[in-house]
Image (cartoon, grey):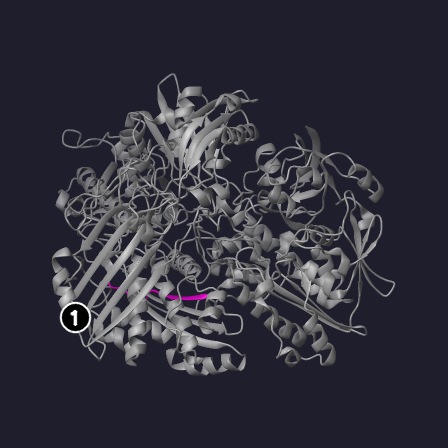
Amino acid sequence: MHNFDFIKPASIADAVKALSSDGAQALSGGQTLLPTMKQRLAAPAVLVSLTGIAEMKGVCRGDGGLHVGAATTHAIVAKEAAAHYPALAALAGGIGDPAVRNRGTIGGSIANNDPAACYPAGVLGSGATVVTNKRKIAADDFFQGLFSTALEEGEIVTEVRFPIPEKAAYVKFQQPASRFALTGVFVAKSGSGVRVAVTGAGQGGVFRWTEAEAALARSFTPGAIGGLSVSPGDMISDLHGSAAYRANLVKVLTGRAVAAAG
Amino acid sequence: MTKVSMTVNGRTVSGEVEGRTLLSAFLREGLGLTGTHVGCDTSQCGACVVHVDGKAVKSCTVFALDVAEADVRTIEGMANPDGSLGPLQQAFQDHHGLQCGFCTPGMVMSAAALLADNPRPSEADVRHYLDGNICRCTGYHNIVKAVLAASGQDVSAVAAE
Amino acid sequence: MPKDHGIGASSKRREDIRFLTGRGVYTDDMNLHGQTFAVFVRSQVAHGRIGKIDTAAAAAMPGVLAVFTGEDFKDVGGNPAGWLINSRDGTPMREPKRPVLAHGKVRHVGDAYAAVVAETYAQAKDAAEQLAADSDIEELPAIIDMAAALANPSNRVHDEIPDNQCYDWGWIEDNRATVDAAIKAAPHVTTLELVNNRLVPNAMEPRASIGEYFPGTGDYKLTTTSQNPHLTRLLVAAFVLGIPENKLTVVAPDVGGGFGSKIYHYGEEAVVLAAAKKLARPVRWTAERSESFLSDAHGRDHVTKIELACEKDGTFIAFRTETMANVGAYLSNFATVTPTFLHGTLMAGPYKVPNVYVNVKTVFTNTAPVDAYRGAGRPEATYSLERVIDKMCRELGLDPFEVRRKNFITTDMYPYTTPVGLIYDTGNYHATLDKAMQIGDVAGFEARRAASAKRGKLRGMGLSTWIEACGIAPSHLVGVLGARVGLYDAATVRVNATGNISVMTGAHSHGQGHETVFAQIVADKLGVPEASVEIVHGDTSKIPFGMGSYGSRSLAVCGVAVTKAIDKIVAKGKKIAAHMLEAAEEDITFENGRFSVAGTDRAKTFAEIAFSAYVPHNYPLETLEPGLEETAFYDPANFTYPAGAYICEVEVDAETGKVDVVAFHCADDFGNIMNPMVVEGQVHGGVGQGIGQALCENTTYDQTGQLLTGSYMDYAMPRADDVPFYNVDYSCQTPCTHNPLGVKGCGEAGAIGSPPAVVNAVIDALHRGGHTHVKHIDMPVSPSRVWQAIHG
């Protein structure tokens, strides 16, 4: 990998300042960024580690929901969110492997917006709010396609605020090599309705399956989506699964997520 | 070059590193602790797993500077004080949980982290926890058996499963 | 009561101590004074003509010490093929030169055409990137698909080979017409077209090499990740660089797995040696995993049509196969023998089938070289046979267990000459099948199936029976068949003056446990403690000679060389004892570490004899040399033939296509067992890899020759939570009749027997679940393929 200057600020303000320099890039857990840099596909001049910022870490109950600091690792979310939001904790506990979960963070994951990552489904499916150093962004506005988000240059995710649904579950079907989601579906039912967010499958990255949401709002049972189908035309096709296969998985996993949510 | 210091296997160490120096490289090249292995470049194989502040991490996917002042433990720090095999290491030998030995350091470090978290794991717990450590020799059978045995569980029935 | 030491004991592995404490020394762990770093520049295109490579900018970069291109090696030799195969028409195979660095053309993505050596790895990497940018390579159309390669003579991997064919081999060609006639006249013929998927061996330690040159003496040293250091020395010396063999030491230290991929000599080894000479400094190279994917020899990659002709009751009449085997862009050292003599000769299986004919066309493509990978040809044969038998059973409504039983060679038929040229010395296939059915509780399957169904899963059971030929030999026979090397092995047993023992073996351990198991044999035979025996391997300067470890040969060939050397030690010890005890040599017996005069209590311990040999004060110097060291070379009289029966149970999730292996039972006959614990471990590992081949591993090139599965992000190997505990039994033992240990070899068994058992189980599950239209699914039987098959 190419060399760079390494900076590890202790506050959000210092991080934002450091990120304003030319060629600067934020580093969170690094579980995706480091392999990318090894391949020389990313070559930042300055790397700003966000792992030393205490105000960006931790899980706590806040106004109407659960607040997760952006630099909180998957392992911490898996543990500390379990009592408050079990579906989210289970999602975090199923990302990668234990060693990856001890470094990878929620902020890093959603800022990267890998189309096969788990967190985007959890954030979108929960209707969470992404808090940055500048503003609050609704999940529906945050994810903007493959590896693309509403984040502006130099803007960093500092926290994610999750409303806690009545029922929720995430079901992931692993890609056998990478262990990312070949397809993953997050289903959440709350007073305002049902949200179904799908990762791993859509050509445009994480998306909401609105037909299923409507059907499940009428009847929150696996059978409610029996008559629906997903168009393979919008699905990813690769050596691990055709578009038709992924379309099938979206439906199967949605049903299983509803069943698991109870 | 920047100076970095940390505690490795209970000893305070320091060295000059670049921004891009990985923890695995610092351990292997900087400190001569070559028990930590590098088996891939995509953070999948787990041969490089060490403990940082008590947590298993892939040392090939962490910059040395990002874990400055941390408490790091490697396979070289797993033996008993007299140099004999620690209980988990001994279970690996007793149950033939290694063949070529290349994945072994990472496997042992991951298993140690599991047992610290979950002292009496089920077979499924062990298999799930070792998901990020690839072994090409053993088919995992004896690794899982060794970890179960190290947790004090009776594995005498395993071979005749 | 199980033994606690010596032959047959599950002695704990002594090598584990260093591996478990981080003190193993693998090639990349070495840190040499003055070392430099090599990085290879690899082709980004599958097929291209090399134009100008402007090395100036790279050479001028910081820290760069040397730059090499194919031009620098164009006048040295090529890396040769180890086996000459003749085509059906008697013409010899086409054998293109395999240069140290690609010259003229690049022929696969990852083909190294230049190298940079620098003071640091990062500097070498930077300069290699520059050199790649300064290389003019004209991309040519890639030749990827084997059928298209054979059909399109205008597009050539090697310009001098018009149809991209290496050879068109028939076995046994003289039987072809008879087999054709038998199939034509048969009451039933089952045909199956299948793919034996291309695999990347993926030893967890990437390849690495360090070259050293000592100007004071002109000696070279190569430290390298090899299963076979003597072969590497021979090839580098005699074929590639012309370094005199006695000026080159090859050391293979701790090696992190091989599975075949480290048998061969690779160009990187020659480059680090040449660079070390040029710079008079150590030059080291370690593959990144992505380089390993592109440049290690791959395995399998056969496309086969097999026909099984039989009576309506399932009695076999004939097997006939037509196979295209991919050798990739160049001939790796054993690429030509793997699809032929390691494949075609096994195509009778454990069955008394009278007619077998095998045709193999071997094809050059713009892909990485393909060579032997765990099992090497025998898994391909077993898979073809066991899948087509399973299909035939379904077509005729026959019981797959009974069909095997009906067709097995019986114990009264040994030695049994197969129609494909092998002579099986011994075996008992009915016994291993019965054992597998017992430990697999075949009778209880229906209850398990019903329980799975309650959980919404389709359960199936698959059987495969397998046989392999290990310990390839004898040399005079393989020489007739085209081998360019001998296939003996060697060992030296050195009894030191103080009575402890050093044993130098030609076999190399890269996970097999030789340091423990060979010591058990020596200790047992000499009546000394295991701890007093040290096994030395992997260093050509210490070992008489050797052919390395692969093909499940270590014990059956080198292990026997060890025992032959021990026999010589004992014979000499008797002479010494006779002198010391003032008795006739023929009256001396050796037992439990003591040389005794028969019928008396007069005796000398082994240690006393050893001491006397080195301090020969009371010694028959006029008729016997001092010292106690013996070397033996052993060239086996025949192959060994381990065999067994495997039963796999799977659960299939029909909605997602996911297959879970829920039970795996192995009943193997390995002959005599030296260390049961190690044998079980070998079977576990082989089965793990076989399940990987069956369910998830696949090597995919796109039509431009880019490797789509070039990292662990896309190449799926089993993880701990993908496999169950395996049930391994080796109690059926018919000892090999032609080696004194009675051993057969166990290293490849699991990888040979398991893939068809898994696939047969999946097809069985689908049929039991009502999806009877599914006749076959090619490996890897991935979730998407299963789902696709269910849904047409």
Q: Nearer the viewer, residue C789 or C64?
A: C789
Q: Nearer the viewer, residue C769 or C382?
A: C769
Q: Nearer the viewer, residue A207 or B23?
A: A207
The image quadrant that residue C498 belongs to is top left
Q: Is residue C332 left or right of residue A15?
A: left
Q: Residues within 10 Å of mark 1 (few under 14, many from 20)?
A: few
Q: Residue at x 59, y 50 (%)?
A: B109
Q: Report which residue position mark 1 lands on.
A: C184
Q: Nearer the viewer, residue C313 or C462?
A: C313
- Res C592 seen here: no
Looking at the figure, which quarter contains the C terminus of chain A?
bottom right
Q: Residue at x 21, y 52 (%)?
A: C169
Q: Residue furthest front?
A: C154
Q: Is A70 rendered above or below residue C238?
A: below
Answer whether residue C683 is magenta in the image: no
Q: Position of residue C403 (x, y in %)?
A: 26, 76
Q: Position of residue C528 (x, y in %)?
A: 33, 47
Q: Position of residue C674 (x, y in %)?
A: 32, 55
Q: Is residue C531 left or right of residue C290?
A: left
Task: Identify the main secondary structure in magenta.
Answer: loop
Give the magenta-colored segment's residue range.
C724-736
Find numbered disc 1 in the image and state the secondary structure of the residue it sits on.
helix
Under mark 1, the amino acid is Lys
Q: Is C411 rendered above or below residue C530?
A: below
Q: Is C285 rendered above or below residue A35?
A: above
Looking at the figure, which quarter contains the N terminus of chain A?
top right
Q: Position of residue C257 (x, y in %)?
A: 42, 47
